[in-house]
Image: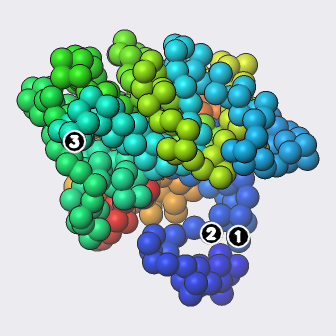
Amino acid sequence: MTAAEALRARWDAVMMPTYGTPAVAIARGTGCRVWDADGVEYLDLIAGIAVSALGHGHPALVEAVGRQVATLAHSSNLFVHEPGIALAERLVGLLGGGGRVFFCNDGAEANEAALKIARRHGRTADPGGGRLGVVAAEDGFHGRTLGALSLTGTPAKREPFAPLPGPVTFVPYGDAAALRAAVTERTAAVFLEPTLGEGGVVPPPPGYLAAARAACDAAGALLVLDEVQSGIGRTGAWFAHQGEGVRPDVVTLAKGLGGGLPIGACVAFGAAGSLLTAGQHGSTFGGNPVACAAALAVLDTIERDGLLASVRAVGERLAAGLAGIDSPLVRGVRGSGLWRALVLTRPVAADLEAAARRAGVLVNAVRPDAVRVAPPLVLSAAEADRGVAALAAAAAELEGAATVGASSTVAEKGSS
Ligand SMILES: Cc1ncc(COP(=O)(O)O)c(C=O)c1O
């Protein structure tokens, strides 16, 4: 048994089976490369599900985290500290000002905070409880805790845990007319991703977010944009919604923010920023100094190294390369920046993910017919080319294999 096989066997024995048994036992990483426990090298084109923004072992992250652990690792919310305040100021500035921040530990918690803000908004507007509704998108994903799950537009993920908080109305993503029809004076908030992430990297039609803003304004509802996956440079803008010229009431963040350290943030603007009052929400670890120092290092590095421009340029090159893969299995490419889905003609994404691994590249079967590519934001043009070549080889291997058409269990289980 190899070292990686031994780790997988130990995982099998002790971990809850929520993820099945992951195929790779990762041991270490540098930049966009990782090695498994047997020393096998992979090009990391998934970055821990769109998280490791600076890649692995980035000196700025290592320095910031090491320095902060040595200075003050934890304080709880009983005390204020410089890294937390500096990060909040920085995020509010990047988001255009006028906001207040609640720090938490991941994306689901950020959406829980946003849902509680929505409840307070609804109860303030109608103390009788007539404005508690939320509108969210079919195939949208907002997390696994009960509140975040209640907003997640996949019945198979919700139903085992019913009843969930509500009422939540789900509308087809990208259909502005359906959204307008669903948002009424009983709606406290609309929750949307600027592009569906777990739904398969599906951008909406142009003007969709602006239509959502207008529908919320007309009905007096909050617009909550879940930028947990799309934010912090992933699309080549600091935040995906900025390209649409829309100002949300609430933005939720996590994933890339800490560059691999766990941190989430709920940022609310104007009156929404003061709806949760003293004692109404909290987190022991949220805004932990080490996680905040890591996030500041991520933001500094994105800025200093011009990574937003790089994400746009390398992302275009990556997309063109993926679209150029000459295979009957490839239908096309969706997404923006370094956040793409290779869309397949058949539901063989899990097979392609496995073939890509054999070709030395880590990607993720985000849907049965779509493979997600979400590498570190530091991906170079040469690494993008290498990834495309490996995926082309993987598609060619699959075309020749008798297993084409085998069902895509990993994709059906989902990844987050
Ligand atoms: C858009 C979006 N929101 C929320 C979440 C949940 O984040 P977490 O897994 O950190 O709780 C995810 C995770 O994939 C996500 O993509």
Which mark, residue 347? Answer: none
- Asked if residue 386 shows in the view, the reply is no
In screen coordinates, is 205 left or right of 34? left
On screen, 99 above or below 262? above
In contact (CB < 8 Å): disc 2 and disc 3: no
Quarter that holds the N terminus: bottom right
Closer to the camera: disc 1 or disc 3? 3
In screen coordinates, is 29 left or right of 184? right
Which mark, residue 25? Answer: 2
* N-term-proximal mark, 2 vs 3: 2
* Figure quadrant of residue 52: top right
What colour-coding does the image apply?
rainbow
Q: Position of residue 84 (x, y in %)?
A: 71, 34
Which mark, residue 129? Answer: 3
Does the beta carbon of the residue at mark 1 sit less than 8 Å from ligand 1? no
Quarter that holds the C terminus: bottom left
In screen coordinates, is 132 left or right of 284? left
* Figure quadrant of residue 225: top left
Which mark, residue 37? Answer: 1
* N-term-proximal mark, 1 vs 2: 2
* Mark 1 and mark 3: Cα distance apart in space: 55 Å
Three-letter amino acid code of the residue under disc 3: Gly
* Figure quadrant of residue 193: top left
* N-term-proximal mark, 1 vs 3: 1
